[in-house]
Amino acid sequence: MSTLLDRKVPPALRAVLDQDDNEGFTMALLTVTEQAFPHQALISVGEIVVLDEEHVRLATWPSSTTTRNMARTGRCALTAVVDGVSYTVLLALASHGELALPGTALTVVDGRVVEASADTAPYAVLESGIRFRLTDPASVLDRWVTTRRLLRELGPSVWSTRTTGDQAPP
């Protein structure tokens, strides 16, 4: 059963995303290809921060299919399972430039929640979503903490001057 939620990051999902060291938690980032097929990428808490209840910031690899799809459409969906509930958050996107990290750079986009929903089934318990185990936790967790700190330090969302609509600000 799907339930439409308030236009914000669901509190249970936000609580998980606020943890810098939440190893294993994975979200599906869904976009649409030029051929109109769905495209799935997997992201961790190391690549997303919640700026406030209506805005998130994502860091993605510049040459990825996901980054190209998001730039072309200005939209994506995030899905995750938290405490037996499958959440879907639809985002309108706007570019926030690049994030320089030691040895690499990431593309940064700001997302504004357009819709959020929760799915449950009265006849079943959803036990988990996608999970992973890091092969080198020390180096990855350090990178996550740095990436998330820098994403927050970029300041307010580019959406902060807009109050309505799902088209990217100029």
Image (cartoon, rainbow, N blue to C red):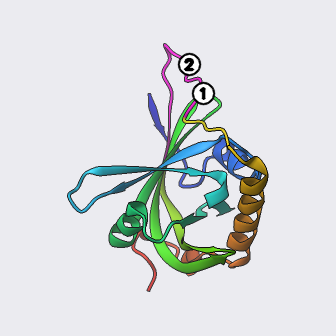
The answer to which of 104 and 78 lies nearer the viewer is 104
x and y, in percent, of residue 150 in the image: 72, 73
| Res 93 visible | yes
Q: Which mark is residue 125?
A: 2
The answer to which of 32 and 61 lies nearer the viewer is 61
Which residue is found at the position 71% from the left and 55% from the top? 140
Quarter of the figure that contains the C terminus: bottom left
Tell me the kind of residue under disc 2.
Val
Query: Is 121 left or right of 106, judged from the image as shown?
Result: left
Residue that badge 1 annotates: 84
Quarter of the figure that contains the N terminus: top left
Find residue 49 and report its image quarter: bottom right
Tell me where the magenta segment starts and ends, as one range. 116-129
Q: Label 2, secondary structure: give it.
A: loop
Which residue is found at the position 55% from the left and 79% from the top? 96
Nearest to N terminus: mark 1 or mark 2: 1
Query: Is 147 left or right of 69, judged from the image as shown?
Result: right
Indicate whether 134 appears above or below 71: above
Mark 2, residues whose alpha carbon is within 10 Å: few (<14), some, or many (≥20)? Answer: few
Q: Residue furthest left?
A: 35
Main SS, magenta residues: loop
Query: Is 24 left or right of 37, judged from the image as shown?
Result: right
Indicate whether 152 appears above or below 122: below
Q: Is residue 125 magenta?
A: yes
x and y, in percent, of residue 163 in the image: 52, 73
Tell me the kind of residue under disc 1.
Gly
Q: Is residue 99 magenta?
A: no
Dot 1 and dot 2 residues touching (CB under 8 Å): yes
Which residue is found at the position 66% from the left and 57% from the top? 46
Q: Residue furthest bottom?
A: 170
